[in-house]
Image (cartoon, rainbow, N blue to C red):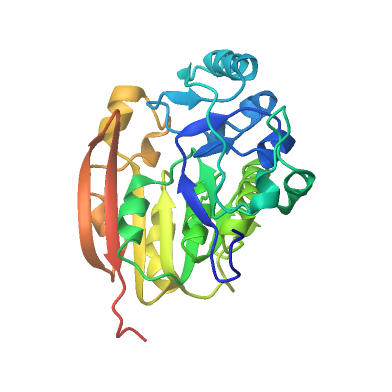
Amino acid sequence: MRNSPAQRVQLIQGDFLDPRPADQARCTPLARAANIPADQLADRTHELPPRSTIIRVIGPPDVAQAAVARLAELERRAEYAGAGWCDRSGMDEGDLAQGSDGRRGAGACAGELSSSAIYRLWCPNAFLERVSAHLAPGTALDLACGVGRDAVYLASLRWRAVGVDLLPDALERAQRLADGCAAAIVRPEWRCADLTDDATLDGLGRFDLVICFRYLNRRLLSRISERLAPGGALLVETFTTMHRERHGRPRRAGLALELGELRGLAPGLEVVEYDEGWREDVHTARLWARRSARTA
């Protein structure tokens, strides 16, 4: 059965990596698998799960084993998890017609096959994932958005997101990530700009949510309430001096938070939640703060 117009495609955490060429993956999608062709893995590492995760690779044995070897070269742990099985959700009888080689009918291979899900291996920021479940979708600003995972995640929840970053190559990857999820998201807007320039955010208006992860700009945070709509939320998470003492990063001492410092960096906001601690091998401070709904 085809998806009805009212049925929205969802962006869902997948279980497997499908390393086949993209056209083959479109013709015969494998259940709960995200497609990253083996020859693109080096350029799309930002679409892989966290390094602590063992990547389970499925598909034809020769292709899958080659992908496992390529991932090992990229210092990622992976294992072959079998051939996988065809995902038949969203297909009509014509789509399911298969030849002796297991390929579907011409209609499916022509891109006519519809599906109710797009699968991803990458993960959004865990703090964002937890808190966003308590927030109604609105407008969101992602400061130092990098390759765009968090903005795209919010966009999959129907947020209208704007991502800002200084690096054009990071934003190019963010755009490609959004393109691959286009059917499941509200298109984010990307802006290449220097966040150390006070004028960068002028003209953007106010947002229902501002996020800033693994980037520290104390001056920017001191003025962040100007970017929040009444009742808007701020989420910040970045490295502390304890992380720097163990790992030597960030290289500049000023880019690591002193313990307890983050709580006071965004004046005029109500602190909903504050936390510091080790998360696996990373020590960060987290702040969830909110602007008063009565603020003019």
Q: On the rendered structure, is 127 left or right of 99?
A: left
Q: Quadrant of residue 201?
A: bottom right
Residue placed most toward the observer, 68 or 100: 100
Image quarter of the C terminus: bottom left
Where, quadrant-wise, is the N terminus in this rendering? Answer: bottom right
Q: Position of residue 275 (x, y in %)?
A: 21, 49
Expressed as whole percent of the image width and height from the top left, the position of residue 95 reads: 68, 48
Residue 151 appearing in the image: yes
Answer left or right for 3 relative to 213: right
Residue found at x 52% / y 44%? 119
Placement of 245 over or under 11, stated as above or below: above
Q: Is residue 265 visible?
A: no
- From what the image shows, is residue 225 above or below residue 66? below
Q: Nearer the viewer, residue 67 or 27?
A: 27
Residue 205: x, y in percent?
Answer: 53, 75
In the figure, 27 relative to 144: above or below? above
* 230 versus 47 height, above or below: below
Which quadrant of the figure has residue 172?
top right
- Towards the viewer: 136 or 15: 15
Task: Return the x and y of residue 251 as percentages of the image width and height.
Answer: 43, 29
Residue at x 53%, y 54% (from the top left corner): 152
